[in-house]
Image (tube, grey):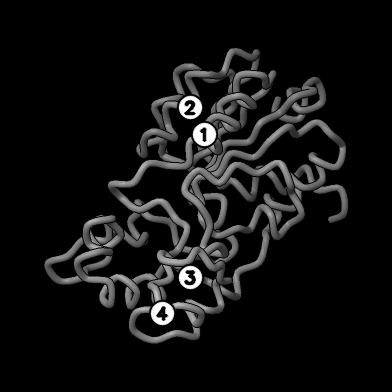
Amino acid sequence: MLKRIIERSGRIVFFGGAGVSTASGIPDFRSGKGLYAKSFGDLSPEMILSKSFFFLHPETFFDFYRAYMLHPDARPNETHRVLYQWEKRDILRGVVTQNIDGLHKLAGNRRVYEIHGSVHENACMDCGASYPMEAILRSTGIPRCVKCGGVIKPSVVLYGEAPDKYVCIGACREISNADTLIVAGTSLSVEPAASFLEYFQGKNLVVINREPTPADKKAALVLHENVEEVMRGFLEDK
């Protein structure tokens, strides 16, 4: 049925979460083996990855960030490759992702809306100088700008921060214009991203996620399966 939906679609938007990148070796957050299931003493990952913790305990923040949020060896998997092929065919109008790993862009996609930012974008909080992910990886303690000595902050949305307004506007615009919306690898438990689905007015809402989601009851098709296994069937160059 999914194949038939794709064949009849002209404006697909893909809305993805952490489950899209697990096949690339990046752990998810909320599964039994995810990051949030690990113990960090009295601190939770949500606390460490918050705006207030970043300003109060920056050295601890960066120790955690380097150890658990950066995956320099990760490469696009089959889901990313399929989405790139669909964009080249001009049937995929946009990728809205909650992931910060940058793998969609690495796969070649250009119509990407990174709601929570990207680990590949970092900037000095004082002079605004830009730095790649490698600058954070090579640093120790608190990364400092070589130009002015200011703190280099990752351009990722921390808990307590609002996502970029223009990225959100673009994502919601694409969703509202889509005839098919594929929601994959996300529990839809993080706001405001989860509310973006309310903008969808098209015909086919497809949900691909191992566990049930709040969107299941509204979907034309629900597949409680692994995202990559489902998407693998659409690869044009197996």
The picture places residue 213, in percent across and down from the top left corner, at 41, 31
- Label of residue 196 in the image: 2
Look at the numbered discs 1 and 4 and tell me whether their residues touch, using CB distance below 8 Å. no
- Label of residue 168 in the image: 1
- Label of residue 63 in the image: none
Q: Nearer the viewer, mark 1 or mark 4?
A: 4
Q: Which residue is mark 4?
A: 149
Residue at screen point 41% across, 75% down: 66
Look at the numbered discs 1 and 3 and tell me whether their residues touch, using CB distance below 8 Å. no
Up-down relation of residue 154 to residue 167 (above or below): below
Residue at screen point 58% across, 32% down: 171
The picture places residue 91, in percent across and down from the top left corner, at 80, 31
Look at the numbered discs 4 and 3 and tell me whether their residues touch, using CB distance below 8 Å. no
**Which is nearer the eye, 167 or 37?**
167
Question: From mark 1 to mark 3, how far is it between C-alphas?
Answer: 24 Å
**Of pointers 1 and 4, the one earlier in the residue sequence:** 4
Q: Nearer the viewer, mark 4 or mark 3?
A: 4
Question: From mark 2 to mark 4, how far is it between C-alphas?
Answer: 39 Å
Q: Amino acid at mark 1?
A: Cys
Question: From mark 3 to mark 2, how far is it between C-alphas?
Answer: 27 Å
Question: From mark 4 to mark 3, how far is it between C-alphas?
Answer: 23 Å
**Of pointers 1 and 3, the one earlier in the residue sequence:** 3
**Of pointers 4 and 3, the one earlier in the residue sequence:** 3
Look at the numbered discs 1 and 2 and tell me whether their residues touch, using CB distance below 8 Å. yes
Q: Tell me the SS state at disc 3.
A: loop
Taking the image as shown, residue 45 lies to the left or right of residue 91, namely left
Q: Which residue is mark 3?
A: 70
Q: Amino acid at mark 3?
A: Leu
**Of pointers 2 and 4, the one earlier in the residue sequence:** 4
Look at the numbered discs 2 and 4 and tell me whether their residues touch, using CB distance below 8 Å. no
